[in-house]
Structures are given as structure tokens and as C-alpha cells.
Amino acid sequence: MKLETIHQQVLELTRSTGQWIKNERVNFSQSSVELKGLHNYVTYVDKQAEEKLVEGLKAILPEAGFIAEEGTASYKGEHYNWIIDPIDGTTNFIHGIPIFSISIALQEDDKTILGVVYEINADEMFHSHKGIPAYLNETEIRVTPQTDHQLSLLATGFPYHDYDLIDQYLGLLKHFMETTSGLRRLGSAAVDLAYVACGRMDGFFEYGLNPWDVAGGAFLVQQAGGQVSDWQNGNDYLFGEQILASNGHLQAYYLDSIQQFFPVEK
């Protein structure tokens, strides 16, 4: 398998699909919004974009399986699997807030070897594959060198369907408001992770996410020199619904802070 060739083909597919999404947004009507679950929305744009991605990725690597948000394709490949989100930030898309992205990851034997996050409206393509650095378009990116948590900037997301842990989460948000330079909630976990990778954010944490929300971005953070874990300091951040990503220097502080409100299960 020529990973470099696959990488370039994925970038071309992602950009063309992103342009289609952007064009559809011009005349988009909220009357086409469907409800998948509590505060969980989908549109025909999500569905058709996923169909375009799945069709294109099948042509690039026919033997690969898929984990896809909208269920266009859902079957496991023997060695290779794509994890894709056609629009990460659908609520932003619906309301015309220009922060939403395409997220794609390729796994080989359950280990990510390629990641792409395309922030469509900014035309910013964050990408990498195994063995090379992470890039924003054609420029190599790195996480921040920040070591002082009081000067750090964190990204997060808010729970939208699972409120069982809301009180602890609000306590954690208060803690970080008091001990860092601020929190940002952009509405796309994939973009949050890409921003950690390129040094715009020092860290990102959230719970209740799915693998397609974080797979591409988490890989980018690692390729850019950062660190990713679940909230128990393990590696179950794709399917464990808890993720912490940082520049690495601040991982221990952020993790200790999280565990004050969400103690490690014993």
C-alpha cells in the first residue's frame, strides 16, 4: 500500500466534497433538518456528503471497512478501516455558523495511520500520515511549547444529550476558568483537535464523543508532537467517550484537574 498516494487522493476527495458542502449551504433551509436523537441533528447534506466520501474512499482502498456517522457504510475490514464524519459541527452548519469540518481517519489493524480534518469555510486542510509531520495546507505544524497552565488556552464542548455528569462538568469548567487564560467552545471537536495540533489551542477535553468526532484530529495532535489520552490516562479515547489532548507539556496538569472532578475508576 502506497500511503503517500492514498494521502493525496484523500485530500483531493476531501476538498471536492467540502466545496460541495459549502455550495449546498448557500441555499440551505432548516426545514430539511431531521432529528436523530435528543439535540442530535442531521441533514441531507450530511448524508449525501457521506455517500460521496464513502464512494470515493472505496475507490481509493477497496478492501477497507467503514465506521461512518450517518451509517452509509458500516462494516469492518480485515486490516483497514476508515473512520469518517462528513460534517463535524452539524449544528453550526444548520445555523450558518462557519465552523464545521470533514474528519477522516484511516486505521490499519486498529492503529490510525492517516488523519485529515478539513475546516471547510476557512479552506484549511489539516493532514498527516504515518511517518511524516502534520501539516496545515502545505505548512508543517507543531503544538505549542507552553508550559504554564495559567497562560494556556483550552477548547471544550458542552454535553448535548447525556446530562448525568453535568454538575461535575460545570465544576471542572469553573476550575479551568480560574486556572487558565480561558476556554473556547467552537462546536466541532475535529476542529478543536486540529487547533491543538497547529498551536492555536494548548489543550482540548470533552466527554460523550464518538470515534468519528475525534479519530482524525487526535492523530494530527500526535503527529504534531502532542499527547492524547482518555480521562484515566489510558488509550481508550476513540471509543471510551472521553478525550484529553494537549501539547504534552500540560497533559499532567489537565489530567489531574479532570480527575479532581471525575476520579479514576478503581
Image (cartoon, rainbow, N blue to C red):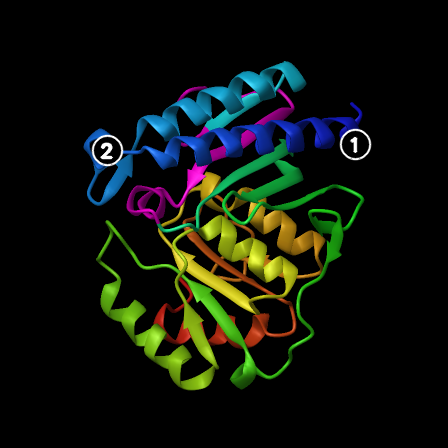
> From the viewer's perspective, is residue 181 above or below residue 251?
below
**SS of the residue under disc 2:** loop
From the viewer's perspective, is 110 left or right of 164? right
Q: Position of residue 241 (x, y in %)?
A: 41, 49
Residues under labels 1 and 2: Cα distance? Answer: 38 Å
**What SS does tag 1 mark?**
helix
Q: Residues within 10 Å of mark 1 (few under 14, many from 20)?
A: some
Which amino acid lies under the numbered mark 1 shown in the image of this protein? Answer: Glu
Instruction: Residue 82: say if magenta.
Output: yes
Q: Magenta region: which residues? A: 68-96
Give the amino acid type for the residue marked by disc 2 in the picture: Val
Check residue 248 in the rendering and tell me which mark sits there, or answer none: none
Q: Which residue is pictured at 71% across the width and 32% down the height? A: 7
> Foreground: 169 or 145?
145
> Do the CB atoms of the residues marked 1 and 2 lie less than 8 Å apart?
no
Q: Which residue is mark 1?
A: 4
Whole-percent x, y for residue 141 in the image: 72, 58
Camera-side residue of 78 and 105: 105
Q: Residue at x 55, y 67 (%)?
A: 201
User: Can the viewer see residue 75?
Assistant: no
Check the image and name the residue furthest to the front.
27
Q: Quadrant of the C terminus?
A: bottom left
Judge from the rendering whether residue 84 lies leftward or rightward of residue 199; answer left or right. Answer: left
Q: Is residue 165 visible?
A: yes
Residue 248 vertical position relative to residue 174 in the rendered view, above or below: above
The residue where tag 2 is placed is 33
